[in-house]
Amino acid sequence: MNSRELGNAIFERKNTAGPAFWTGHPNDKTIPIYAEEWGIEPTREAIHQYLRDDCIWLPSNGFYYDEEGNAVPQFDMDWGHKRASINTDGPFAEAETLQDIAGYPWPKADQLDFAPIYAELERNPDKLIFSGAWACFYHVAADLFGMENYFVKMYENPMIVEAVTEKVVDYYVEANERFYAGLGDRNADVMFFGNDFGTQLDLQISPEAFRRFVLPSTKRIIETGKKYGKKIMLHSCGSIWRVIPDLIEAGVDALHPIQAGAAGMDADSLSRFKNDIAFVGGINAQSFLVESTPEQIARETERVWNTLGPNIVLSPSHEEILPNVPAANMKAISDTAHRLRGE
């Protein structure tokens, strides 16, 4: 069984082998540290090869160009405002009507270039590949208003929040339609997208607000992936256990990164969902992965497998691997995952 076959079995909740493993996304500052430790080339690809990753993440909307061929952000967050933080007023801070958002330069999916991603997919036929548009619509909407404005307008002017969200999601839906329509028989089994809905203690908004302002758009994106036969992996940091049943019902096949240090997101608490959804993550990267020994990491990795398996990709509880995570501890997760499947 190769990595792709194992990963698909996990996402279909039919796994009878051991766990899969995914390093995540080593930070630019982490790469040279790991490379020196292991005597390998200072590239992410070399790290993934060294750690025997089963999975690869290739977001399909990373190459966006304006009409002059310049690489530009997909959404202009400085349109009419110079933003200094997520809570600074965004372009729609004062928006009250549809007319107020009409002049915004909404991105166009036909300005995406999928050729580099298609080429990468062809080079990795045997891995489980996470792809599709990184559809972070919740964060985009929050930035377009300014986060505090966004939350307040959910109550004071829900119509404008729904209208902006719809425009943002229209773009991501079309981006996925174009990507998958041109995919052919290339390997891209999992549509992966994410929005951080949780804090360390709870959801950022109430479950009721989540179901009104967030869940319908999540379903629209999921439906696009399902239309093309893709499994769905959703990313959200933080404590989101209160809406996991909603996500399962919406069609999410796997949840990432199961932030183990957040309230209600530890392996024991999440085990009640394991018959209905697969997991990717689970090894606490906030503190445990930073402070523990490789031997402790190995024991914890095996415990998480025993608690949440068999349908889990063992991985840190955040995809961005920062320099404070010792190289030996990352290797301990990989070695344990491969040992648990008899390798």
Image: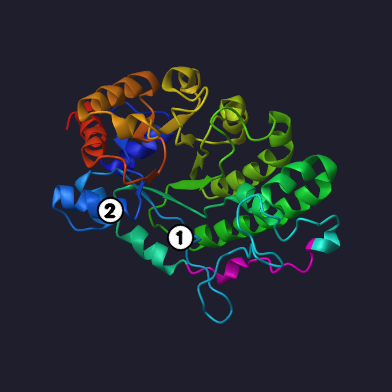
Residues packed near mark 2 inside 10 Å, few (<14), some (14 to 19) or many (20 plus)? many
Check the image and report above or below for 321 versus 333: below
Question: What kind of element bears circle 1?
Answer: loop
Residue most extreme to the front:
84
Question: What kind of element bears circle 2?
Answer: helix
Where's residue 247, x and y in %?
Answer: 59, 33
In the rendered view, does 232 fall on the left or right side of 15?
A: right
Q: Which mark is residue 31?
A: 2
Where's residue 273, x and y in %?
Answer: 50, 22
Q: Amino acid at mark 2?
A: Ile
Query: Looking at the magenta stretch, what is its main secondary structure?
Result: loop
Is the residue under label 1 in contact with that under label 2 (CB below 8 Å)? no
Colour setup of the view: rainbow
Q: Amino acid at mark 1?
A: Leu
Task: Please provide the residue range marked out in magenta.
Answer: 101-113
Check the image and report above or below for 169 versus 207: below
Mark yes or no: residue 19 visible.
no
| Residue toward you, 90 or 332 | 90
Q: Which mark is residue 175?
A: none
Check the image and report above or below for 29 versus 212: below
In the rendered view, does 37 fall on the left or right side of 108?
A: left
Q: Which mark is residue 183?
A: 1
Residue at 84%, 46% in the rendered image:
157
Camera-side mark, 2 or 1: 2
Where's residue 3, x and y in %?
Answer: 29, 42
Residues packed near mark 1 inside 10 Å, few (<14), some (14 to 19) or many (20 plus)? some
Residue at 23%, 42% in the rendered image:
327
